[in-house]
Amino acid sequence: MHSDIDLVLTTTRSVRKRMDLDRPVDRDVVEECLDLALQAPSGANRQDWAFVAVDDPAVKAGVSAVYRAAFVDHYGTRSRPSAAGERLPKGVWESAHQLADTMHRVPVLMIPVRHSVPPQERAGQASWWASILPAAWSFMLAARSRGLVTSYTARGCDREQELAEVLGLEYPGTTQAGIIAVGHPDHQVFRAARRRPLAEVLRWNREDCDG
């Protein structure tokens, strides 16, 4: 257990290459994390969400096959990257391929969904996604606080209908919000990542805009 919230916030990131694929994750821990995640806000307090936890090898294999196809469609293969693949930093490229190659071995896959369809207009997009993604992130934070690691990806949604068939979800009335890989780390040493300086990303009011 990590009780230091600052530590949890600065060490929760996409862990792919350092996930222990052979050590199972207890269902009780997954359910405990999700119980905490359900405290996340949702628009008008609708809570029209659901979470599909996958640990059955056959179902994981089905999800993995669809995800890998979507991944290759977008990023290409290791030997023949697409334009999008060539734009990825080398470390991210290797790590992303690791997840695509081994998703079927990840101990647990968590798929957050909403029982509704996102609006087409831009004005409603933020509000709609804000009613499911905070819960997904809270789940990842709760997992990290319990010594687990996660990796969130939305690439599989490129083939959402195929994933819905694998998972037994209604389509298109139910919308998937990504796949969260969940596992134990190969070891527990994680540090804050490099990020752009605060001064480069923060602006108060109309600073640097006037004149």
Image (spheres, rainbow, N blue to C red):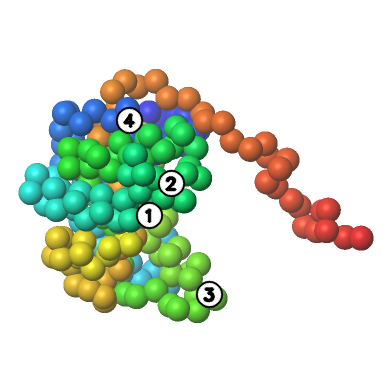
How packed is label 2: few (under 14 Cα within 10 Å), some, or many (20 or more)? many
Residue 8 vertical placement versus 127 (above, below): above
First in residue order: circle 2 vs circle 1? 1
Q: Looking at the picture, which amino acid does disc 3 mark? A: Arg
Provide the residue designation for mark 1.
Answer: 74
User: What separation in Å lies between label 2 and label 1 (alpha carbons)?
Assistant: 7 Å
Q: Is residue 207 visible?
A: yes
Mark 3 in CB contact with mark 1 (< 8 angstroms): no
- How many marks overall? 4
Q: Which numbered marker is on residue 122? A: 3
* Residue 163, position as x, y percentages in the image: 21, 61
First in residue order: circle 3 vs circle 1? 1
User: What separation in Å lies between label 4 and label 2 (alpha carbons)?
Assistant: 18 Å
Mark 2 residue element? helix
Q: Which numbered marker is on residue 85? A: 2
User: What separation in Å lies between label 3 and label 2 (alpha carbons)?
Assistant: 27 Å
Q: Residue at x 83, y 53 (%)?
A: 208
Q: Looking at the picture, which amino acid does disc 2 mark? A: Gly
How packed is label 4: few (under 14 Cα within 10 Å), some, or many (20 or more)? some
Provide the residue designation for mark 4.
Answer: 17
